Amino acid sequence: MTTFDNHERARWAGQAAAYRDSFAALCAHPAGALLDAGQVRAGGRLLDVGTGTGTVAALAYTRGVKVVAVDAEPSMVEATRRRIPDARVHHATLPDLPFDDGVFDTVVANFVVNHVGDPLAAVSEMRRVTRPGGRVSVTIWPYPAPPAQHLWSTVFDAAGVERPTDLPRLPPDRDFPRTAAGLSDLLHRAGLTDISGETLSWTHRTTPDAWWSGPANGIGTPGLIMKRQTPETITRIRARYDEHVTPYREPDGRLALPTTALLAAGRA
């Protein structure tokens, strides 16, 4: 485990409920496209790596797939076990999956590669447990950040919040461009072939309080920044937040936040 991995484990510890009530709905949007890119078939064997609260695994289960799910965070494992009692759900971390070579028809990872200390090793491990001819399908958030996520930078800037300078980052030799081409190249270097990719764009609809609650409870990089602020600064951030979400408010008071994700898949 790298310093980056250890940092990720600490930041997600016990956060299943906070994630479920805030950003899980945002991350759920690509689930169908992720499974389609993985060419899942009824009766097939699917591994959902970094399952979170089980969104992709649950959708795969409704398609008649034999689902196995893993996550590095115990609270996520328990949440998925409750959500899909018939699935096999295990605690496991990339890049060391507790499975033999080639046992799955499809392996998927929804917004997981963003959170590992060695992306190439992670995708290579997913390929290892996929049968020859099976598919590996992944999503990531792009960089520069799409409008929904960039909104937090705008709010922090308006509130005069300084960013932490001590957060772990991937060393250059382990990082990759968070672009469509960069993600496809990562899959290629991991040994996958017949690689396809696309940019998914949608409007995420949520309430102002739900979108606030994720960072307010420490979720994501905005949550890391929020946790280091004084109560007075949090009050100032909330005031700027209420101002800057106004252009995204719909008549019913909900927010309509444009966002994008990158999807790529390849054959093992």
Image: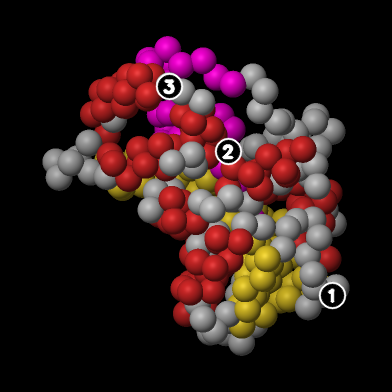
Applied colour scheme: secondary structure
Look at mark 3 in the image and give the residue it sits on: 230
Which residue range is magenta in the image? Answer: 138-164
Across and down, in percent, residue 47 comes to 67, 71
Confirm or deny contact between disc 3 and disc 2 (CB under 8 A).
Answer: no
- Sequence-earlier tag: 3 or 2: 2
Across and down, in percent, residue 31 comes to 50, 62
**Kind of residue indicated by mark 3:** Thr
Front one among 221 and 40: 221
- Sequence-earlier tag: 1 or 2: 1
- Name the residue: 49% across, 35% down: 223
How far apart are the alpha carbons under marks 3 and 1?
48 Å
Numbered label tally? 3
In this rendering, the answer to whether 58 lies above or below 189 is below
In this rendering, the answer to whether 126 lies above or below 2 is below
- Name the residue: 59% across, 42% down: 11
Across and down, in percent, residue 104 comes to 73, 76
Look at mark 2 in the image and give the residue it sits on: 142
